[in-house]
Image (cartoon, helix red, strand yellow):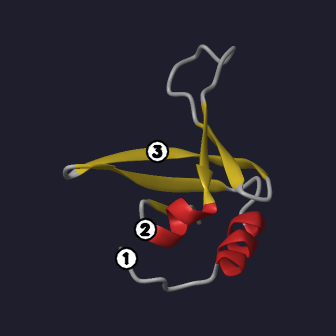
Amino acid sequence: MRKKTQSIEAIKAKIHAMLGKDINMSVCRGRKRVSQYAGTIENTFPSVFIVRLKSKEKDTERIPCLSYSYNDVLCGEVRIDEVS
């Protein structure tokens, strides 16, 4: 179990402040596997938030979305950095 460094409410406020902004995200997938994504935070809900990934292809009909809980950020499984 990892140490708690912030409260859930502080994480929710931070992510809600990034709504609609470009972000870089890294997600721990286990066994030293880390996935890197670029996208925007599309929506926030009471227990999860939605990230719309940037499409590298010209096909924009279906751009994938990922959803994560605030607990994933709290535990360090998901790291979010705002692009300046």
In the displayed structure, would residue 44 be above or below residue 6? above
Q: Residue furthest front?
A: 1
Residue identified by numbered label 3: 37
Q: Amino acid at mark 3?
A: Tyr
Q: Residue at x 35, y 73 (%)?
A: 1
Measured from the top left, where is residue 17 in percent x and y? 76, 69
Q: Residue at x 56, y 64 (%)?
A: 71
Asked which quadrant contains residue 10, the reply is bottom right
Q: Residue furthest left?
A: 31
Asked which quadrant contains residue 53, the reply is top right
Q: Closer to the N terminus: mark 3 or mark 2?
A: 3
Q: Do the residues bearing badges 2 and 1 touch, measured as CB atoms within 8 Å?
A: yes
Residue identified by numbered label 1: 2
Q: Closer to the N terminus: mark 1 or mark 3?
A: 1
Q: Closer to the N terminus: mark 2 or mark 1?
A: 1
Mark on residue 31?
none
Question: Looking at the image, is mark 3 or mark 2 nearer the viewer?
Answer: 2
In the rendered structure, the answer to whether residue 80 lies left or right of residue 76 reads right
Q: Residue at x 58, y 55 (%)?
A: 23
